Image: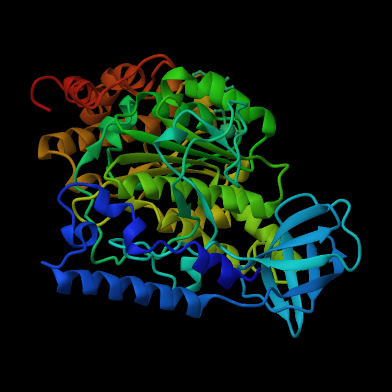
Amino acid sequence: MTSLDVETATAVPPEEADAPATAGESPAVRSGAESNAPEHTGLWCGFLENCRQLAAEASPLLASGNLTRINGLVMEAAGLKLPLGGTCSLSNGSHSVEAEVVGFSGEKLFLMPAEDVYGLSPGARVSALETPNPPPRIHKARPHRRRAIDRAKLLPVGESLLGRVLDGAGRPLDGMGPLHTETLHPLQSRPINPMLRAPIERWLDVGIRAINALLTVGQGQRMGLFSGSGIGKSVLLGMMARYTKAEIIVVGLIGERGREVKEFIENILGEEGRRRSVVVAAPADVSPLMRLQGAAYATALAEYFRDTGKQVLLIMDSLTRYAMAQREIALAVGEPPVTRGYPPSVFARLPQLVERAGNGPVGGGSITAFYTVLAEGDDQQDPIADSARAILDGHIVLSRALADAGHYPAIDIEQSISRAMVSLVTPEHLEAIRQFKQLYSRYQRSRDLINVGAYVSGSDMLLDRAIKLYPQFETFLQQNLSERADFDSSTGALTGLFGAAP
Ligand SMILES: Nc1ncnc2c1ncn2[C@@H]1O[C@H](COP(=O)(O)OP(=O)(O)OP(=O)(O)O)[C@@H](O)[C@H]1O
Ligand SMILES: [Mg+2]
């Protein structure tokens, strides 16, 4: 059966449409509508127009080609034409593998598998996988399908996914049975018109004292969490997931160790965080395509909840592994590496992903996002760290020296910044932050002198004050794993450091 037969057979005519079943909707459809004939005619015309569009879009022939070569990660196919980004299925009798078109050269298509290609043999059949075209329904506008991005893969979304752990293809990983959701959402979305985006104007309580008070994050802000390995990124993200005031949390665990996925969900996220979270896990051992898809799926889930008006916290661990997955694909297809082995497409993909987070149109929900960025060897000049810093609305840097000294969360206040903060907090709060940073950095600069006893008290009034307050600053910045610091108590503690008049 051709796709045309399938699609038209499932079209829903006005009499059977679900919409007229509710009170208050057009009586024309229910009653035969002699009294309201023009409206009835309008509904039918709209419905038939949608059917006409559906028929025009349908491809009557199912094309297929053959697998001609597998070279490392990339496969080559000939005999069919598919668009860039299109999906296809490769089958070898009963064995089938899904793949995406990542490039072409003349008549040859380059395909990247989503799963293990073990068992595929030369000449395996390659056939296009079309995104199902939703049947027209009366009273419902058909989704846009003009652009290629509108035909992206559809994956499950919905409130029933809260508490669940899924892979990059939307399949459950938690052994809690099948998903009970009928809503599907496209993996990719059209960019939001920047003129329609609501500005960042309200703070979000993330439950961490140092962030709430000194690096205030706004609803719809996108932040980076920069650090070397093993300094406490995952633990800090887990604390935010447990203690934040956001309504929904979407966690994308991309390219991390498989062992860490279970550990993050059970120990770090905990029952409290998990109840209002959806976790998408695409660990290091899945294909690079699946890791990219995992990040896109987590973002699509966050977009879906945002579009229903919710305040969403999106946590992506890690953006560097996402970039590395794109690097694997781009190098395999033959793109030249430009900066430290990263091809140019990596730097194009990062903003495309990050720009999907943030605020929606005015009056809607928001996606506040935290992306972890691995600064290898604590190198803040790493090309991914550099690029991420430019496209995000702020960065929180974790310091190995603080972590080594048992100072957790190991946030380096001097190097961290929240770019939206100025418009979010009161002038008194801003002034307290300024004072804190001034005294803190004054102490840090003279630290060695103080430690060897070379500083003579009384020679610098500011430094004297910094030395007096420093133990309190340290206590203020540290926070226990089990401690929640809400926004008001965090700002109260900050202004309290400087007495009644900050
Ligand atoms: N707030 C904290 N309190 C106590 N210990 C902590 C805290 N944060 C981190 N640690 C310690 O640091 C270790 C590493 O933390 P974590 O796994 O979060 O690091 P990471 O930066 O995510 O590492 P990787 O780069 O490998 O993913 C933890 O196992 C824990 O021992
Ligand atoms: Mg980690």
Query: Looking at the picture, how far across and down is residue 286, in whole percent?
Result: 71, 45
Residue 416 pos. (x, y %): 38, 41
Q: Residue at x 22, y 73 (%)?
A: 42
Looking at the image, the residue that sits furthest to the right is: 122
Q: Is residue 220 visible?
A: no
- Quarter of the view holding residue 343: bottom right
Relative height, residue 226 to residue 474 (above, below): below
**Outermost left residue:** 501
Is residue 92 found left or right of 8 in the rendered image?
Answer: right
What residue appears at the point 18 percent right and 22 percent down from the top-left corner? 492
Which one is nearer the viewer's eye here, 85 or 377?
Answer: 85
Please state the quadrant of the image where ligand 1 appears: top right
Q: Residue at x 27, y 18 (%)?
A: 468
Q: Which residue is at the front of the view, 159 or 33?
A: 33
Judge from the rendering whether residue 473 lies leftward or rightward of residue 8; answer left or right.
Answer: left
Give how far across and how far down residue 8 sits, in percent.
Answer: 50, 69
Q: In front here: 60 or 32?
A: 32
Against 381, residue 252 (above or below) is above
